[in-house]
Amino acid sequence: MTIRRGARLGRLGFYTLASATLTAWPAVAEYHDEREVQLIMIDDRACTFFILHSVAQADPVVPSSPWFALPKTHPNYAELNAMLLTAKASKARVNVKTNGQIACGHGAVDTLSIL
């Protein structure tokens, strides 16, 4: 009986560990480098949206959507939004990394840098 309980606990421990590992797996991010900002859109949602030249899919979390979403809840929203507007106005190229999550229905921006 003791062996059976030990085996049962071992199996339970294995499944618990496997479940925790699978649910804690980080989302995959996408990185787009040296792209020009094609379009910026702001509407009544809590995000600034934009499209980059030659990017057909911003992030696989929203397949076939070229839209990036910079959520206003991002800790550096003001700075990133200013950089985005500056890049559009000056035609500077940017690097954008998403975080593998959805914001306002589109791929959420994690980082942005101007080249």
Image (cartoon, rainbow, N blue to C red):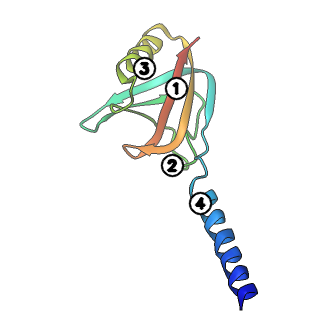
Q: Which of the two labelled residues, at mark 3 and mark 4, occupies the earlier sequence position?
A: 4
Q: In the rendered structure, are the residues bearing label 3 and label 1 in contact, judged by CB atoms less than 8 Å apart?
A: yes
Q: In the rendered structure, are the residues bearing label 2 and label 3 in contact, judged by CB atoms less than 8 Å apart?
A: no
Q: In the rendered structure, are the residues bearing label 3 and label 4 in contact, judged by CB atoms less than 8 Å apart?
A: no
Which residue sits furthest right?
Answer: 3
Which label lies toward us, 2 or 3? 3
Mark 3 lies on residue: 80
Distance from the alpha carbon under mark 4 to that under mark 2: 25 Å
From this view, report whether residue 30 is shown above or below residue 63: above
Which quarter shows the N terminus? bottom right
Q: Which of the two labelled residues, at mark 4 and mark 1, occupies the earlier sequence position?
A: 4
Q: Which of the two labelled residues, at mark 4 and mark 2, occupies the earlier sequence position?
A: 4
Number of numbered discs: 4
Label 3 element class: helix
Question: At 50% across and 31% down in the image, what residue appears?
Answer: 110
* Kind of residue at disc 3: Leu
From this view, report whether residue 25 is shown above or below residue 11: above
Choose between 74 and 109: the one closer to the eye: 74
Q: Which of the two labelled residues, at mark 2 and mark 3, occupies the earlier sequence position?
A: 2
Which label lies toward us, 1 or 2? 1
Q: Which of the two labelled residues, at mark 1 and mark 2, occupies the earlier sequence position?
A: 2
